[in-house]
Image: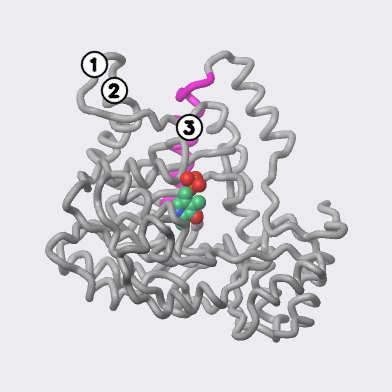
Amino acid sequence: MPTDNQGFIPPAKPHIGEEEIEAAVAVLRSGMVVQGPEVAAFEEEFTAVSGTAHCVAVNSGTSALQLALMAMNVGPGDEVIVPSFSFAASANAVRLVGAEPVFADIEPGSFCIDPDHVEALVGPKTVAIMPVHLYGHPADMTRLVQIAERHSLAILEDACQAHGAKVNGKPVGSFGIGGTFSFYPTKNMHSLEGGMVSTDDAQFARTLRLLRNQGMEQRYANEIVGANMRMTDVAAAIGRVQLRSLGAWTEQRRANAARFDAAIKTVTTPPVAEGAHHIYHQYTVRVEGDRDGALEQLKAAGVGSAVYYPTPIHKLIPYAHMDVELPVTDRAAAEVLSIPVHPSLTGGDLDRIVDAVNALEV
Ligand SMILES: *Cc1c(COP(=O)(O)O)cnc(C)c1O
């Protein structure tokens, strides 16, 4: 049984248990540590989450995005429509392949990319749309798929925060040519560092496999120019152990969120769109008042909350020159606050969090 967090309740609590340690040690003892049978098994098993025919493992979520864009042939002269309200990796991956991100605003409820704004931004250089399933809430894929079809655009889903999220029962990562997942320690499951690209397209999967490993399938028979983005078997072994708990952890997150929904009165709790299966990577409220003051008050009460993200990507140094107006994004960046929702919280922890939030003076 988990025990109450004494003192400070951390905003995230990456799990590294005995099973993870034993799985890693077993790989180390085998002497075969680089991409091998554990990676192959992890890829096969993760298709149950992505709902796709293929998965290709890499060394991070950022690599997954970059590799997918490379395999899509996105490069100089191309534009990809991305939300600005995300982790910088979403836009960085576009720049890393030499293309330009075009920033779209978000919907105020889901915090995900606004399909109407996406369609307004489509131009002659647009080649793809990259929705981000922020906080584990899926973007409006029904409308985004229609828009992509109407304008002959590809969709690459950034599902790095959304392992197991769904729209009308269909898993994220299965709507476009590819989806990307991160296994960074604070994500809903981890492999220390790691990432995955999901796809239903066998040819695309083969290109991903070539590009992550110097362009070769047979050793020293390099077919194309590729990178080294391989996952190790140590990481994959840890990821496989974590994957066995993902379903139960997700249900615990959803149960914690339901409790917050029912009990929190002082701030705006996160709405869930119709047909959306939210997996609560974050439980993010809106503070329509002194958000930074609320952050301090929660810290003083021993509740580790955090702001994702205080600065939207379009205002970060590498992108600030683009000078775009995204009012819904700016407002969210000023108002959001994520409180702990991770599966290791006890009933006592949840009570403390609810009491601290309901005692906020904003
Ligand atoms: C974590 C994250 C990434 C990057 O994943 P890494 O494994 O840290 O490289 C990309 N996009 C989003 C939305 C993320 O949250």
Residue 118: x %, y % from top left: 27, 71
Q: Are marks 1 and 2 in contact (CB under 8 Å)?
A: yes
Q: Which residue is mark 1?
A: 221
What's the residue at 40%, 32% (across, down)?
229
The image quarter containing residue 350 is: bottom right
Residue 140: x %, y % from top left: 37, 71
- Mark 2, other Cα within 10 Å: few <14 / some 14–19 / many ≥20: some
Disc 3 from disc 1: Cα separation:
24 Å
What's the residue at 55%, 64% (across, down)?
308
- Please indicate, yes or no, whether residue 166 appears anywhere in the rendered image: no
**Labels 3 and 1: the sequence-earlier one:** 3
For the residue labelled by badge 3, is the local secondary structure a helix, a strand or a loop?
Answer: helix
What's the residue at 30%, 47% (across, down)?
200
Query: In the image, what residue type sits under mark 3?
Result: Ala
Q: Is residue 153 left or right of residue 27?
A: left
Disc 1 from disc 2: Cα separation:
7 Å
- Residue nearer the viewer, 124 or 325: 325
Residue 342 within the segment the image draws in magenta: no
Q: Are marks 3 and 2 in contact (CB under 8 Å)?
A: no
The circle drawn on residue 217 is 2
Q: Is residue 358 left or right of residue 282?
A: right
Magenta stretch secondary structure, dominant: helix
